[in-house]
Amino acid sequence: MEIGNLFLLFSLTTSVFSAVFFLTALKSRNIRYAKIAEDLLYASTSACFAALMLLTYYFLTDNFSVWYVYANSNLEMPTLYKLSAVWAGKEGSLLLWSFLTLLVTSLYISKRKDLTELKVGLIMSAFSSYLLIILEFTSNPFVTIPYLSTNGYGLNPLLRTFEMVIHPPVVFLAYSLSALLFSVVLFNSAKGSSASDQRAIARLSWIFLTLGIVIGGWWAYRTLGWGGFWGWDPVENASLLPWITLTLYFHLRKHRELFAYLTFTFVLFATFVTRGGIISSVHSFGSDYSGYLYLAPLLASLIPIFSRIRDFENIKSLCSPILPVLFSSAFIIVFMGTVANLMVKVERSYYLITFLPIFAMITLLAVLKIKKMNSTAKLIHAGLILLFLGSFSVWLFETHETLILGSENGFRLEDIWLNEDYEKLTVVAKIQTPYGVVHPAYVIYKIERKERGVSSVEIVSYPWKDEYFAITDFDLKKKSAVLEHYTIPLISCVWLGSALMVAGVILRGFYSRL
Amino acid sequence: MNSKRLSLAALLIFIAIAVTTLYHNISPYTSPSQLLELDYANDIQVVGKITDLKAENGMTVFKLTDSNVAVKVVYKGSVQQYDSEVVVIGDWKDGILYAKDVLRKCHTEYAGG
């Protein structure tokens, strides 16, 4: 048996027994069982970490006898991308998520020594066990292939960026923290150290969820060549849903716990959408139905919500009675669009007509209230205002033109040439534009994968706009190229606004000691 | 009307607007098999995988398949033989799909992840 499988099985077994001992300790109130449960949890975390490290080792040493390594790597790939390839696919990312869930649980459990510890330990070790079962039986990264391949299939060229090294760990850490938040809120009273625990975990979840979304948007902008940071795609939308519920959580005075539950529910919904294999949709994985397994914890997470559904009537906002309505509307708009998009194509105009006015009203509230806020809240809401300005400008006023170079005034293809190294072919165009000389490129990787090419965009940035250039077609013999040119107003506000919001929440955490 | 009822009314109004807007801003996907049943169609969105990719007279020509049948697509632009499905938006006439745009499956659903 592949040694990685042994680590996984050990991690799964210890995690299951950890849950059993947490339950026994709860029932018997015997501290000895609690200690055993805790030790089993640490053993499970360690074994899962060992499996992750082993998979990383296989990538770094080009062990193509492991199918997952073969499918996501090749000899010529730089070490940094071999590292990111560990979580580039379904199997590796689930291993990472399982480990991070076990890790945050272990860290929480190690600090608390009370009844809450047992209850949270029980829920979290049961959830970790469930992830490990999916991992072991449907998405095992240690499956070997019976022949030795001399080279791998290669990583998707779109994922060969630095952003993709950090994006999945950040997103999965947010997902793990949202699971922990769910468990802690479920069993904690909202007083004393329990309340500060909740706040700290909620803040960390929000920070990593926001960072994950922003890094994803930054990556899409820099890599995909369509001049935007948000495509209203179901996967992007699904990541926005828990963000909306968690943001509303911070704005409520009464019954905010309902939105902590919903955050975890919609983290699982996002996972289901991403991995669900919903048929008749372009946003599916075809034959991979393992995503449906996430429906079980998703339905389970609804239990505390439905059991307290009447509390929704008495939700009280910290700042404005209309705020929960606006957030709920934004949530429902995105949710309906996401679900519809799994079956039919939803036009971008739907979101512009519905979401943008709600976003504008939320921003207007922030503008009206900002004077009365403390300094960190001011920073966060100034970030929101900038984010709105940037998004509004990009979504409504971005311009795009496709240029066949040579024929348009102001744009001249001065040269186009081919560079080659051991890993890739790079077609570089030198183009004279009204904004100076730019060198957008098109990179073709020498890999077995049929999907080999990716645009390397060039962006000329001004504080008030970006001029964005991407080559989508070229002919080296005729010395011609097709250039996509976008003028994107106030995109810098999107990045600056997001950064201010995250910085504000971090500072707020430090001021109140997280 | 108290604030609770006002909030509920506002929420229902927002939802009604969203449902109406959504209804007017959706368009169905068609498979190559369904496309073959039509004589002609404009601005149709067909989902399938790209095969037999080649260049002909400065145009990109490929087949779009749903595993059962394949239709010929002519496109003025470049595509790759992507592993994942694509959406071809274009006009269908005389047994050829004249593509105006080729959209790729979402990048974020990386490698089956």
Image (cartoon, rainbow, N blue to C red):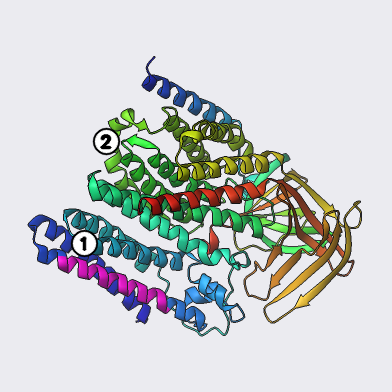
Chain letter of disc 2 in the image: A
Residue drawn at x 60%, y 66% is A161
Please indicate whether residue A194 sits to the left or right of residue B29 in the image. Answer: left
- Where is the C terminus of chain A found, in terms of image quarters? bottom left
Co-location on one chain, circles 2 and 1: yes
Please indicate whether residue A366 sits to the left or right of residue A192 in the image. Answer: right
Q: Residue A382 at x, y = what percent? A: 54, 42
Q: Secondary structure at mark 2?
A: loop
Q: Which residues are magenta?
A: A35-54
Tell whether label 1 touches label 2 (CB within 8 Å).
no
- Where is the N terminus of chain A found, in terms of image quarters? bottom left
Q: Residue A12 at x, y = what percent? A: 28, 68
Please indicate whether residue A179 sits to the left or right of residue A228 in the image. Answer: left
Question: Which circle marks residue A19 in the picture?
Answer: 1
Q: Residue A254 at x, y = what percent? A: 31, 34
Chain letter of disc 1 in the image: A
Decide which of A63, A216 is in the foreground and name it: A216
Residue drawn at x 47%, y 31% is A326
Residue drawn at x 47%, y 51% is A273
